Image (tube, rainbow, N blue to C red):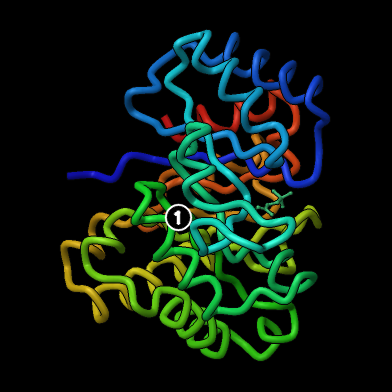
Amino acid sequence: MPRKPLIAGNWKMNKTTVQAAILAQDISNAFDERLDVLDVVLCPPFIDLKTVSTVLSYDKSPMQLGAQDVFWEESGAYTGEISPAMLAEVGCGFCIIGHSERREQFGETDEGVSRKARALVTRGIAPIICVGESEDVREQGDAVALAQVAAQLERSVEGLALGDIMKCAVAYEPIWAIGTGRTATPEVAQEMCANLRARLLVLYGSAAAEKVRILYGGSMKPENASFFAPLPDIDGGLIGGASLEARPFIDLAKAFL
Ligand code: PGA
């Protein structure tokens, strides 16, 4: 069975509630077709989740809702945190975890990412687990980058059972490509995604390696998406900048139809 492409728009810390409602509505209005063969997920800031959820359900949109982070506990004295149960209740089907901005600026560790992944799957939310190498590592050459990112994935899925990993997606996001306008070449992205799939094969066997969707993220735009879409181990994109306006986001997603 071919994997269904997944396009997730990571709005990061952009869009007030009013702006989020307008953007979700614009995307929903324009995204009319063939969503049965493509999963499109909008990941607004926590405070906008309810608003975007309302827009999508009012429109009976097949687009789905995702969060940008989560905490692994169910409830309790964790000031500022949001639990998987809260995300589930607001309608999130997906949650990005381990984004490099969280790893670099907020001290997120592989161990924390794996705990978040385990907590999400128990609530029926699909983790989108982000991995990717820094510029320094990339400069040490392909072999170093491949080994480092595969090891990062292995640590980030620690403790996930086979049934859990089947619910996850992985996003390969080279840090040097995020928000910089410097995309990885399709060859580099394909090689890395194939290597991540090979690691999943070793860890979980062929059913998981075949099923888990692996996305590319890092300055993907409508102009370059068609280079990534046909690659055998790239099953979609995690999109930052190009997800903040309806037209580019839709044009980009359509490259994967
Ligand atoms: P970008 O961000 O598309 O703006 O490079 C991608 C991401 O950080 O998920």
Q: Quadrant of residue 240?
A: top right
Q: Is residue 114 left or right of residue 19?
A: left
On screen, 197 above or below 30?
Answer: below
Viewer-side residue, 66 vs 182: 66
Residue linked to disc 1:
127
Q: Position of residue 247 (x, y in %)?
A: 69, 21
Q: Is residue 244 left or right of residue 77?
A: right
Q: Is residue 209 left or right of residue 227?
A: left
- Seen at 37% across and 49% down, the residue is 123
> What type is the residue that disc 1 sits on?
Pro
On screen, 222 above or below 22?
Answer: below
Q: Position of residue 129 (x, y in %)?
A: 49, 62
Label 1 Cα neighbours within 10 Å, binned few <14 / some 14-19 / many ≥20: many
Q: Position of residue 36 (x, y in %)?
A: 33, 23
- Seen at 34% across and 78% down, the residue is 159
Q: Position of residue 105 (x, y in %)?
A: 80, 70
Q: Secondary structure at mark 1?
A: strand
- Seen at 17% across and 68% down, the residue is 206
Viewer-side residue, 171 vs 98: 98
Which quadrant: the C terminus?
A: top left
Viewer-side residue, 196 vs 228: 196
Q: Is residue 72 left or right of residue 36?
A: right
- Seen at 69% across and 72% down, the residue is 103
Q: Quadrant of residue 119?
A: bottom left
On screen, 154 above or below 68?
Answer: below
Viewer-side residue, 208 vs 146: 208
